[in-house]
Each structure stands twice: as C-alpha cells, then as structure tokens.
Amino acid sequence: MVPPGLVVPPNFAPTLSFKGLEHLRLPPQFRDPKSDWFISYLFAIDLTEPTQLNATRIGDQLLIYFRVLAAGQADQDGKMIQTDTFSIVTAKTPAKSGNQYWYTLCGQEPFANATALKQNIRVKVIPGKNEHGVVFISGSHQRLESAVWKERLRIRLAFEAATVPAKPTRSGKEARDPLRPISK
C-alpha cells in the first residue's frame, strides 16, 4: 500500500500556505549529477482547503519550499548554501495553457554537490480530482524537448485522465495516491 502522503505544510516549511497532502516521486538517478534525471522530480499537492491560486502565489510558495529544502546544506567545501540568492521567475506559458504556470528557479542544488542550478518548473492546477483540486508540479534542469520532460508530461496526462479511487485510512478518512491512477 502506498502511504497517503506527507502533510503540507511540512514541519520543515511551516510558512507554506498550501494545506494538503504531498505525493512525491523521484527517479533513482535523482542524486546523480551525470544523469539526465538529476534533480528531476514530480509531486502533487492534494489540497485539503480552499486555496487562491495564481502565478504569483504559486511562484512565491515554490520559492519558499525550495529555499527551505536547501537551508542548512553545504557545498563540497563546507560552505553553506546561500538560499537568499535563490530566485524564481514566471516564464511565458503557451497560449491556451489553462491553469498552467511555468517558472525558472535559480539557486544551488542541495542534494549532491551544491552546484549552480537553473531549473524548469511546470505547474498545473487540476480541479475536480478532489474538493479543492490538485497542484501538480514537475521540475528538471533538462530542456523541455528532452526525454525527461516527455515522461513528466506523460505521467501528468495519465493522472488527469484517470479516476483515482479513494483508499480508507485508519482514521476513517479517505486517502489516495494521486500519482498512481488505477483506472480510466
């Protein structure tokens, strides 16, 4: 059984304003700087409260999240990562993108060697998967034409097309893993 998800905001980032469950997927090569899949991820935040979502608000929340992830991490020489230098810029989205937001995150990657990182992030707000919607987030430093991004898009489209049945939890509330749709 897949765990129902991590509570958002997590203990390490209590200032996030999103409320819900985070479902994270990392490829096995996530920490391998030589891999195309290095620092490539996708996660969905299954919102549990009404949330006002727009490009600025989502970008602000992503910047908080990534700064907190890198806080306290050091590079190979022991120098602390300077999270105040991290920035996020809203990128131009294609016409008719509907509930999609594109960003470029600049900073240092905190998981392998603290090198400079320019990351593409794609967000899609998906209403109708639950009462308050799902924020689906993909990121990679690869070019958007790469196999990494093609796979990320395939997963998101499968998620959007699927019906995700609820799973009972010990508390009696329904929980589910939105990144593993079961039926169409």
Image (cartoon, helix red, strand yellow):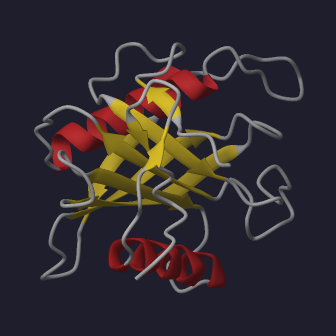
- Residue 94 pos. (x, y %): 22, 80
- Residue 97 pos. (x, y %): 19, 76
Q: Is residue 93 left or right of residue 179?
A: left
Q: How many marks?
A: 0
Q: Check the picture and name the quadrant holding the C terminus.
A: bottom left
Determine which quarter of the picture holds residue 100: bottom left
- Residue 111 pos. (x, y %): 76, 37
Q: Is residue 163 or residue 16 the one in the foreground? A: 163
Q: Is residue 113 or residue 99 the one in the foreground? A: 99
Residue drawn at point x = 35 percent, y = 80 percent: 161
Q: Is residue 16 left or right of residue 81?
A: left
Residue drawn at point x = 42 percent, y = 71 percent: 159
Q: Is residue 54 left or right of residue 35?
A: left
Residue drawn at point x = 67 percent, y = 40 percent: 109
- Residue 118 pos. (x, y %): 55, 54
Q: Is residue 55 or residue 174 the one in the foreground? A: 174
Determine which quarter of the picture holds residue 157: bottom left
Q: Is residue 151 or residue 114 the one in the foreground? A: 151
Determine which quarter of the picture holds residue 62: top left
Residue drawn at point x = 41 percent, y = 30 percent: 172
Question: Residue 13, relative to residue 95: is it above or below?
Answer: above
